[in-house]
Amino acid sequence: MSPLPASEPWRIVASDFLAAAAPGFELPAPTTVEIAFAGRSNVGKSSLINSLVERKNLVRTSSKPGSTRQINLYEARARDGAVFHLVDLPGYGFTVRSRAETQSWKDLIESYMKRRVTLAAVVLLVDVRRGVEDDDRELAEFVASLTGVARPGGREGIELLLVATKLDKVPRSARAAALSKVARATGITRPLGFSAVTAEGRPEIWRALRRAAAVGAMEVASDASDASDVAASDASNVASADVPAK
């Protein structure tokens, strides 16, 4: 891997597999902020995590839906020293497995979200071409139901972030409409588009994750919309300063 630019302290410099837990087993005790990734089978969770840590094979990817049958825990360390635990949850919506096995996955996911005191955010992935499906809405509603629920010794609330994957499969002229459709289906006003092929959206996703985890500010020079917001804010401040006090 080529050296990371010093102007991008959010970039990941080290990542490792830590632990796994199948139904009936426990993860190690939580020690640092955790970000969980959830979505339908084959939506691209493994590819997203690999892209975020800039490694090809940290998380095993498979063309066979339902290959993740346990909770997998990874650690990622950024250039600026920030440490995150990234949690790959079992994919849902894969009906070839038995009903009992599917239910055990659901129980595993819900128990994790209810009890994990360091869980700061859940990243819900949807295929931008398929949009939001019933299982996605159910998970989003479950995360919303945990807002305000006391987790002894834990963080207040769990933020839900929506990522629309496989953005490269949609023509650029149609992407805004596709993302708007996803937003309307969930009520989340700013879903983040992402492509594992081009890494488009990776800096914006890291910005959202760091904000949810209450980790230091992050600048992304390529984000034109934020640059314009800053410019507008600066212009407003200058204008206010020129107005004499009454």
Image (cartoon, rainbow, N blue to C red):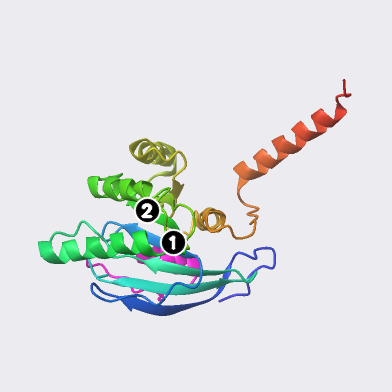
| Spot occupied by residue 56 in the image (x, y as percentages of width and height) | 43, 73
In terms of secondary structure, where does tag 2 sit?
Answer: strand
In terms of secondary structure, where does tag 1 sit?
Answer: loop
Q: Residue at x 44, y 64 (%)?
A: 117
Look at the image and give the residue range highlighted in magenta: 45-65
Confirm or deny contact between disc 1 and disc 2 (CB under 8 A): no
Along the viewing direction, whichever of 224 and 16 lies nearer the viewer: 16
Category of crowding for the residue at label 1, using alpha-carbon neighbours closer than 10 angstroms: few (below 14), some (14–19), many (at least 20): few
Residue 228: name its quadrant: top right
**Residue 175 drawn above or below residue 238:** below
Query: Is residue 128 visible to the viewer in this orientation of the structure?
Result: no
The residue carrying mark 2 is 124
| Spot occupied by residue 42 in the image (x, y as percentages of width and height) | 27, 61
Q: In the rendering, which numbered label is found on residue 224? A: none
Residue 66: name its quadrant: bottom left
Residue 79: name its quadrant: bottom right
Along the viewing direction, whichever of 185 and 169 lies nearer the viewer: 185
Q: In the rendering, which numbered label is found on residue 152? A: 1
Residue with the most extreme top position: 246
**Residue 194 drawn above or below residue 178:** below
Q: Is residue 100 magenta?
A: no
Q: Residue at x 11, y 61 (%)?
A: 99
Decide which of tag 1 and tag 2 comes sooner along the chain: 2
Between label 1 and label 2, give the one nearer the viewer: 1
For badge 1, the amino acid type reads: Pro
- In the image, taking residue 6 as reference, residue 130 lies left or right, namely left
For badge 2, the amino acid type reads: Leu
Q: Quadrant of the N terminus?
A: bottom right
Q: How many marks?
A: 2
- In the image, taking residue 178 as reference, residue 25 lies left or right, namely left
Q: Is residue 63 magenta?
A: yes
